[in-house]
Image (cartoon, rainbow, N blue to C red):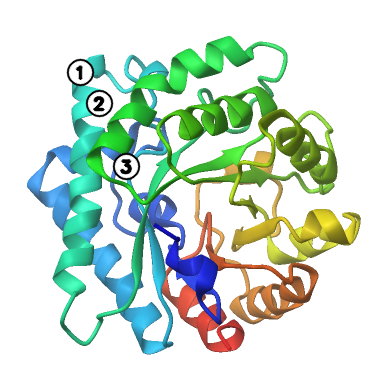
């Protein structure tokens, strides 16, 4: 199957920062910042479905499709113990998370929100996203850590795998290799720091070139996420045009704060939406092959609506 966002004449939307919305707006406790345990309760499923439906409605109102993320960012087996789950239970919740996203898609079909909806089997780092693990997680470690999750997501029927907020290239390469083994497309999105580089100092250009070299260019497209649009545009200006052409996803934070500042914040910084939207519009000319746009930490439906109105053309 050709992914619908690859052949669309205009970018698809994806989600905004559901986890930060759940924590700061809905006052929901997310262990390890993971929404996966919510899939195990009626109230949790209803809340997730509510946000899925909101995102779908925004995309439909702006005449485009949407990529929905499964709540599996913290769903790899090394997260079982920190989440106080057995490995079997963790993998069961991965399956349930895919079912929940599919239900949102099925419920939209045939109605006023009948738009292309693509399900991303979303994955994340094997440890804290703000921890540099490049010297401590090997390729073999990463393959072992992701293998069962990839198998479950593939078996449950996601449309592609999406590795988000990654900075460890061993993790990126491992997921790409495993995606190829289960014959699924894969997207890799890097998180950048305030200086425009990955945690540990590697440049965005170097990261993309290295993963492409080690995986024979199997990645469908790359992404940049978890930074403000102004930070992303500054980083992209340092990236050669051929590498920028490989970037198809932008998911931007609401706040200009650093990751360290955000990690130690007691309140949510939603940023200035006008500055956010202007910044987002400034990013798009730098990524001529962009396929999907959306929000990351601190963003909500208002941010998503704002960039949809400004940037979906």
Write the residue at 25% across / 25% down: 90
185 on left or right of 257 = left
User: In front here: 207 or 233?
Assistant: 207
Q: The N terminus lies in which quarter of the figure?
A: bottom left
Real-space CA distance between mark 2 and mark 1, rounded to the nearest whole angstrom: 5 Å
172 on left or right of 297 = right
**Mark 3 highlights which residue?**
35
Secondary structure type for disc 1:
helix
Against 248, is 28 above or below?
above
Q: Is residue 235 visible?
A: no
Secondary structure type for disc 2:
helix
Real-space CA distance between mark 2 and mark 3, rounded to the nearest whole angstrom: 14 Å
User: In front here: 73 or 291?
Assistant: 291
Write the residue at 28% across / 64% down: 52
136 on left or right of 77 = right
199 on left or right of 174 = right
**Mark 2 highlights which residue?**
91
Write the residue at 78% across / 33% down: 210
Q: Earlier in the sequence, mark 2 or mark 3?
A: 3
Return the x and y of residue 56 as percentages of the image width and height.
32, 73
User: In front here: 107 or 157?
Assistant: 157
**Mark 1 highlights which residue?**
88
Against 306, is 90 above or below?
above
- Please tell me in which quadrant of the rendered image residue 33 appears: top left
Return the x and y of residue 305 as percentages of the image width and height.
46, 80
Against 220, is 177 above or below?
above
Q: The C terminus lies in which quarter of the figure?
A: bottom right
User: In front here: 187 or 183?
Assistant: 183
* Callout in the foreground (2, 3): 2
Disc 2 residue crowd, few under 14, some 14–19, many 20+, Cα 10 Å: many
């Amino acid at each position: 199957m050709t992914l619908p966002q690859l052949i669309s004449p205009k970018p698809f939307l994806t989600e905004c920062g559901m986890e930060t919305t759940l924590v700061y707006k809905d006052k929901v406790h997310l262990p390890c910042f993971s929404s996966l345990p919510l899939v195990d309760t009626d109230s949790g499923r209803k809340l997730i479905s509510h946000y899925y439906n909101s995102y779908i409605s925004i995309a439909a109102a702006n005449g485009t499709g949407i990529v929905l993320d499964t709540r599996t960012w913290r769903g790899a087996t090394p997260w079982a113990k920190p989440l106080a789950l057995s490995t079997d239970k963790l993998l069961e919740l991965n399956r349930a998370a895919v079912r929940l996203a599919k239900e949102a898609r099925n419920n939209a079909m045939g109605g006023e929100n009948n738009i292309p909806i693509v399900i991303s089997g979303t994955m994340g780092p094997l440890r804290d996203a703000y921890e540099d693990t490049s010297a401590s997680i090997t390729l073999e470690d990463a393959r072992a850590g992701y293998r069962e999750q990839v198998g479950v997501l593939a078996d449950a029927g996601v449309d592609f795998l999406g590795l988000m907020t990654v900075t460890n290239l061993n993790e990126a390469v491992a997921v790409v290799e495993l995606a190829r083994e289960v014959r699924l497309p894969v997207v890799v999105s890097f998180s950048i720091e305030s200086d425009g580089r990955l945690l540990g100092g590697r440049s965005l250009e170097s990261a993309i070139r290295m993963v492409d070299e080690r995986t024979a260019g199997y990645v469908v497209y790359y992404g940049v996420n978890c930074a403000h649009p102004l930070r992303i545009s500054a980083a992209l200006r340092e990236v050669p045009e051929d590498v920028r052409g490989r970037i198809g996803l932008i998911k931007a934070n609401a706040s200009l704060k650093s990751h360290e500042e955000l990690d130690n914040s007691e309140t949510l910084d939603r940023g200035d939406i006008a500055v956010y939207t202007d910044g987002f519009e400034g990013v798009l000319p730098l990524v001529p092959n962009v396929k999907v746009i959306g929000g990351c930490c601190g963003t909500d439906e208002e941010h998503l609506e704002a960039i949809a109105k400004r940037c979906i053309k």
